[in-house]
Image: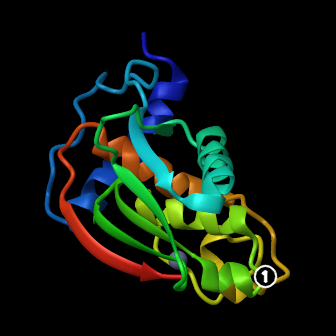
Amino acid sequence: MRSSKALRALPAVAVAVLALAGGQAVAAPAPGAAQPHAVAARVLTYDASQAAEFKDAVTKGAGIWNAGVANVQLKPVATGQRANIRIIADDGWPRTATTSLGSGTIYFGRQAVGQGYNTVRISSHELGHILGLPDMKPGPCSSLMSGSTAGVSCTNPNPNAAEKAEVEDNFATALTGTAATRDLLFVD
Ligand SMILES: [Zn+2]
């Protein structure tokens, strides 16, 4: 007999599958297919070897996401391995170029850091783009993806409940499918 928890999870999964398919009809999971504890989190690796003075902020940003979501986890890449995510310190504005959901390059821009923006918030914000979140600007400090529009005084590095839920949805469906190409550039 299925638990009530598994039954409640079914509509959310079906909605997420439909959204990812652009509204096309997609077969719903077969009854009994939901096994919330049977699927391991997707692991994405990151390479902070070029993050210079921001390595600690990268570690903290990854830790925030690891504590906040279950369907995806961020781990440092092993030496000699190719990472899903590269973090490169440079003198521009912080930005992220994605190649697919969960893969891309983060440019940890010193321009914003020089203006006083919080480095851990920058880190978790840019990682949010890698995890499939768009900018949500303008927005309040309680929103991670409001980015710089929350003002230089905003030091909140944590995604809100909606942002966490969107990442969980992104990777709930990604676990069972192949990642589509997603060439996007987020500046901020
Ligand atoms: Zn952004």
Quadrant housing residue 28: top left
Residue where numbered disc 1 is placed: 116
**Number of marks:** 1
Residue at the spot 74% in from the left edge and 87% down from the top edge:
115
Residue at the spot 72% in from the left edge and 84% down from the top edge:
114
Say if 150 sits above or below 184 in the image: below
The reply to whether residue 52 is visible in this rendering is: yes
Say if 80 sits above or below 2 in the image: below
Residue 18 location (% of width, % of height): 26, 57
163 relative position to 87: left or right = right
Residue at the spot 31% in from the left edge and 45% down from the top edge:
173
Say if 91 sits above or below 100 in the image: below
Quadrant housing residue 130: bottom left
57 relative position to 135: left or right = right
The reply to whether residue 11 is visible in this rendering is: no
For the C terminus, the quadrant is bottom right
Residue 95 location (% of width, % of height): 47, 77
Are there few (<14), some (14-19), or many (20+) residues within 10 Å of tag 1? some
Say if 137 sits above or below 83 in the image: below
- The chosen color scheme is rainbow
Residue 97 location (% of width, % of height): 35, 72
